[in-house]
Amino acid sequence: MIAAKQTTLRERIVLSGAGVHSNAPARLVIHPSEPNSGVSFLRTGLSGGRERMIEAKYSHVSMTELCTVLGAQGESVSTVEHLLAAFSGLGVDNAIVEVDGPELPIMDGSAAAFVEAIDQVGLVQQSASRRYIKVLKPVRIENGRSFSELRPADRGFRLEVEIDFATGAIGRQKKVIDLDPANFRREISRARTFGFLADVERLWKAGFALGASLENTVALDGDKVVNPGGLRYADEFVRHKTLDAIGDLALAGSPIIGCYRSFCGGHKMNVSVLEALFADRANYQIIEAQPRREAPRAELGLALRAV
């Protein structure tokens, strides 16, 4: 998906719900934003009536255990990955996300509610050209048998995500997708987060999954899916891992032109591969989409130039 112009929301969006980990209620107001502003979270409801603006950038990630957290020392917002995936999948470049609690609402555990809300208000094209981050050299992060890597590609953004769980309900699954709005809506957006009943007590003691339920999580008891409605996709688990990867990699700050591959990865490895990419300026190039006219029919096309 190579687009010439940046976009923002046509009008604001208001959503509310509770966080899957904190169980804290939160009201979410997503505002249109100016060209070249990117995505930022406006954390309100802090002590003393304070507010804090936090850019959605990999350098502002403070925690990656079970979710992705931006900011630190109480002035943070967590579980940002599903909304960021919706922005990335639908091509939203600029937005301010105002949230009055410590965690974004989990909704149904997927990005479906965010996609529906964005589709309802629609997007507006802005005057500024869209900028992309083009991967020039492979970068790879390894942890035991797990790995995450970014590799060059001629155009677009492809994800190849593979997982391997011992439970028979999951096993080994792989998802390959070329990211564009149609593919994201159809194949990824409705995939829900998942967890194991055997881990619940340990997670509660650690302060996680306090708001998890069968309404927002695919629950596994051994090799059995507990949810009465079953799965939305036969391979919903790897699709959700792909959803998480799309959201985490949106923290690059601009759409990526390249290929992302992972095996048994997660939030930490998604963010770490971005850190590895940006650690060396030779690994990437920032390019700008430019409209061009091609003779003799003067049809609008796209050119990409280095910034």
Image (tube, helix red, strand yellow):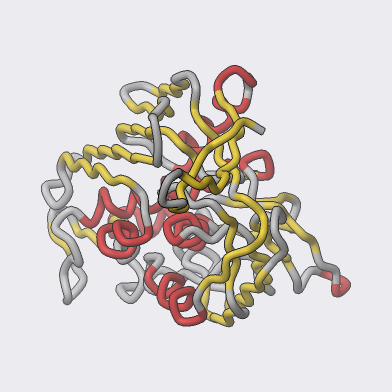
Q: Against 215, is 185 above or below? A: above
Q: Against 153, is 11 above or below? A: below
Furthest toward the front, the residue is: 296
The image quadrant where one finds the C terminus is: top right
**Residue 238 appears left or right of 6:** left
- Image coordinates for residue 103, horizontal then vertical, percent: 59, 65
Q: Of residues 176 and 163, which is closer to you in this image?
A: 176
Q: Of residues 117 and 71, which is closer to you in this image?
A: 117
Residue 44: quadrant of the picture: bottom right
Q: Residue at x 49, y 52 (%)?
A: 3
**Residue 52 appears left or right of 2:** right
Q: Residue at x 67, y 39 (%)?
A: 59
Q: Of residues 295 and 256, which is closer to you in this image?
A: 295
Q: Residue at x 70, y 51 (%)?
A: 71
- Image coordinates for residue 155, horizontal then vertical, percent: 40, 36
Residue 119 visible in the picture: yes
Residue 26 visible in the picture: no
Furthest toward the right, the residue is: 48
Residue 196: quadrant of the picture: bottom left
Q: Tag count in the figure?
A: 0
Q: Against 121, is 111 above or below? A: above
- Image coordinates for residue 50, horizontal then vertical, percent: 85, 69
Q: Of residues 156 and 105, which is closer to you in this image?
A: 156
- Image coordinates for residue 6, horizontal then vertical, percent: 59, 57
Q: Residue at x 55, y 48 (%)?
A: 291
**Residue 171 appears left or right of 302:** left
**Residue 107 appears left or right of 197:** right
